[in-house]
């Protein structure tokens, strides 16, 4: 199976104030780089990063020939616009793992644990204590539905409309919930500048 990793990194980080959260040092390197490295070191076929706000600065962070950046010219329209901008350019894949650029604790092992359950007609979601987390895998069957998304709610609608196609993977770690989009959330993590 050919699976694309799609890292969403186009947003304006409005809750972080005047800093772009993806460039803030997190345990020694920019937050986004943790997600990129996890993706590159996993079993994903290829990794793509959707850029928008401060796209040239974000591209400069990613020092890898194995990453392709995809532009989201409508990034101000919310997270769904980044999903659409990315998925619309990924026709040759059997599935997509949507990763959030502000979840630096995601590991290659977690990615592999999710995608090993993936198939063209399944949605695979990590859960802990009954709560859904990220990243989420979508088989290519859901491509057209993903392309109809809008707003800032991500792909929840596609999941809700296809509950019978969902596979839930129980995860022991809280990393599937750990996104950092405020200064307070970052200050709670050791080793953050």
Image (spheres, grey):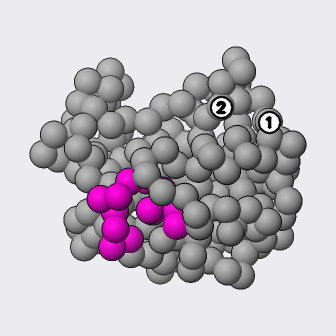
Q: CA distance from mark 1 to mark 2?
A: 8 Å
Residue that mark 2 sits on: 132
Depicted 155 relative to depicted 186: above or below: below
Closer to us: 119 or 59: 119
Residue with the most extreme left position: 18
Where disc 2 sits, the SS reads strand
121 horizontally vs 100: left or right? right
Residue at 55 percent across and 42 percent down: it is 106
Query: Residue 48's spot in the image, x, y percent?
Result: 52, 70
* Extent of the magenta region: 72-84
78 horizontally vs 23: left or right? right
Task: Look at the magenta stretch and give its main secondary structure.
Answer: helix
Query: Residue 175's spot in the image, x, y percent?
Result: 56, 32
Where disc 1 sits, the SS reads strand
Residue that mark 1 sits on: 168
Residue at 43 percent across and 67 percent down: it is 50
Residue at 78 percent across and 47 percent down: it is 162
């Amino acid at each position: 199976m050919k699976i694309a990793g799609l890292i969403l990194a186009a947003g304006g980080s409005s809750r972080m104030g005047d800093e772009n959260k993806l460039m803030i040092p997190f345990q020694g390197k920019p937050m986004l780089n943790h997600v990129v490295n996890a993706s590159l070191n996993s079993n994903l076929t290829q990794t793509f990063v959707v850029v928008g706000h401060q796209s040239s600065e974000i591209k400069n962070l990613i020092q890898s020939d194995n990453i392709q950046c995809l532009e989201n010219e409508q990034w101000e329209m919310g997270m769904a616009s980044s999903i659409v901008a990315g998925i619309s350019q990924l026709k040759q894949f059997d599935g997509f793992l949507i990763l959030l650029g502000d979840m630096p604790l995601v590991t290659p092992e977690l990615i592999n644990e999710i995608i090993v359950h993936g198939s063209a007609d399944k949605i695979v979601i990590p859960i802990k204590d009954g709560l859904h987390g990220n990243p989420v895998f979508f088989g290519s069957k859901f491509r057209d539905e993903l392309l109809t998304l809008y707003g800032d709610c991500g792909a929840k609608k596609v999941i809700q409309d296809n509950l019978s196609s969902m596979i839930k993977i129980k995860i022991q770690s809280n990393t599937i919930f750990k996104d950092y989009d405020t200064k307070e959330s970052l200050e709670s993590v050791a080793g953050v500048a």
